[in-house]
Image (cartoon, grey):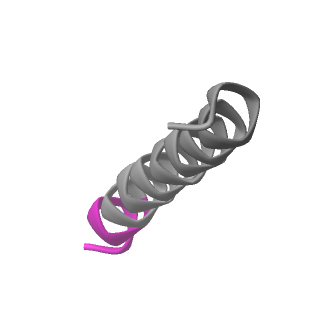
Amino acid sequence: MLSNLQTQFHRMHEVCVVLYVCNFVLEYAQKAYGI
């Protein structure tokens, strides 16, 4: 039970990191290229 919860949390954390990086890249692209 606990290990399953940890796995879900880890997966959610990975998704949050990916979204954060994508958001950072999009903001950088907007500033760099003026999109």
Is residue 16 or residue 20 the one in the foreground? Answer: 20
Q: Can you say which quadrant of the picture contains the N terminus? A: bottom left
Is residue 2 or residue 20 the one in the foreground? Answer: 20
Give the residue drawn at x 58%, y 53%. Answer: 20
Magenta range is 1-6
Q: Residue furthest top?
A: 33
Q: Position of residue 29 (x, y in %)?
A: 62, 31
Whether residue 30 appears in magenta in the rendering, the answer is: no
Give the residue drawn at x 50%, y 37%. Answer: 35
Give the residue drawn at x 64%, y 26%. Answer: 33
Is residue 18 or residue 24 the one in the foreground? Answer: 24
Q: Position of residue 23 (x, y in %)?
A: 54, 50
Q: Is residue 5 depicted above or below 4 in this figure?
A: below
Q: Is residue 22 left or right of residue 34?
A: left
Whether residue 2 appears in magenta in the rendering, the answer is: yes
Q: Position of residue 10 (x, y in %)?
A: 47, 54
Q: Is residue 1 left or right of residue 29?
A: left
How many numbered marks are there?
0
Name the main secondary structure of what is drawn in magenta.
helix
Q: Position of residue 30 (x, y in %)?
A: 60, 40
Q: Is residue 6 depicted above or below 18 in this figure?
A: below
Q: Residue furthest front?
A: 34
Give the residue drawn at x 40%, y 50%. Answer: 15
